[in-house]
Image (tube, helix red, strand yellow):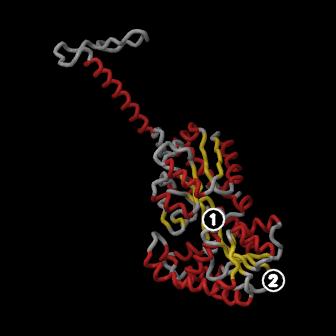
Amino acid sequence: MKGTPDWKHEDRAPAFPVPPAQSDGPPGAPIRHCVSRIVGAAVILFLLSLLAAGCGPGEVPEEWSKLEEKARNQGAITLYVFKYEDYFRTVAASFEEETGIQVTVISSSAEGTYQKMVAEREGRGTVDLWLLSASQVQPAVEDGLLYGPVMGRLPNAENVHPFDAQYAEGFEHGGYVVPAWRNQAVFAYNAMYVSQPPASLADLEQWGKSNPGRFTYCDPARGGSGQAFVNSALYWLTGEPQRYFGHFDQAIVDEEWPRLWAWLRDIGPYVVYAADNNDAIEKLGRGEVWIAVTWEEMFLQWRADGRLPDSVRAYLPAPGLPGGADFLGVPANSTRKAAALLFMNYLLSKESQGTLMGMLRMRPVRTDVASRLQKGVQSSVGRGGCDQVRRWSQCSPSRASEQRLSCLL
């Protein structure tokens, strides 16, 4: 065809059409412009084809089958976690066997990983999946560190508990994260010394006066169980947990929190303060205290390991204690988002969720899996104040009390 380049010989320049004689440009300029236009057009067509197929470096195909294909082509991801790395490595090994995708699990502090995300936000990311504490979700979403929304992309997210699918510590996350599991704060007590533990937070003050130095909760800034105890006291004293959902409001703090500070000061002389979650349950195990606020999974694990006496029990005082969750998110600058989403979906599978109680003593975040384990958990933990929690939660038409304070049994 006339004017078609001849690329048969690599050592011969292509025979482009001779430029028109009336060209005003310098010698050779029309040829350079012609080459530039052809190369530019080819690049544009190539990029458009990538976008159309959802195959750009940062693109994730909408169709799940195509996402799976791209994930396998990506071949590997890096996951940062701040706890339970053995669990993630176990699940990652099964995932790699099934999909051929390698998952490198790196253990780092929650704060250290967050700072890494901030430092890398403008460049090419080195993290593809990220385990966030609930308190990190709001700043991560608001700082633009996460890709999403992802919740609606995952087939296995269909049965995720509706509260965790929407909120992280009262913040509406918009589906930019997916809960990994659920946990629950409890009162653990030694029945050898305590025949009748305080049935409610209202009874705790009198019990503390009668048993000074035998109750502990940890520094809320260094342990989530201490934060759960303080939050529960705040909700009980103000009666309106839904007011604390969403963004921080100083006016509410000024109005409501003085009652909390006054109550904490009142019980202060009878409390032994623990440094963190581990310190609280260690004090209980050594017999230094008789009642400790702790996490349910820690109580169950320590009982199973023999680090707590058989006489230690767990329950929920009325009107209840908050539960929580940790979350998984995909960094916005990850170049292997498809593979990260595929592993995230695998973590939400019935098989992976079913191993949580056995390996971590954690509650599954999937309601269909949790319902199968419900009976066993009830017999292990005891019902405690669950009936009171249910009655109190039904008072709120917004279900905020149930969402934040449900005993999950």
- Residue in the image at 73% along x and 90% along y: 210
| Vertical side of 348 occupied by 38: above or below | above
Q: Position of residue 313 (x, y in %)?
A: 77, 76
Q: Position of residue 365 (x, y in %)?
A: 62, 62
Q: Quadrant of the N terminus?
A: top left
- Residue in the image at 60% along x and 69% along y: 221
Q: How many marks?
A: 2
Closer to viewer: mark 1 or mark 2: 2
Q: Which residue is mark 2?
A: 193
Q: Residue 178's image quarter?
A: bottom right
Instruction: Pick the residue in front: 330 or 383.
Output: 330
Instruction: Pick the residue in front: 67 or 276.
Output: 276
Q: Label 1: few (<14), some or many (≥20) within 10 Å? A: many
Dot 1 lies on which element? strand
- Residue in the image at 51% along x and 69% along y: 170
Rounded to the nearest angstrom, the CA distance separating label 1 from label 2 is 31 Å
Q: Position of residue 188 (x, y in %)?
A: 73, 76
- Residue in the image at 80% along x and 76% along y: 287
Q: Label 2: few (<14), some or many (≥20) within 10 Å? A: some
Residue 328 in the figure: left or right of residue 6: right
Sooner in the amino-acid sequence: mark 1 or mark 2: 1
Q: Amino acid at mark 2?
A: Tyr
Q: Quadrant of the C terminus?
A: bottom right
Q: Which residue is mark 1?
A: 182
| Vertical side of 404 occupied by 105: above or below | above
| Vertical side of 389 occupied by 341: above or below | above
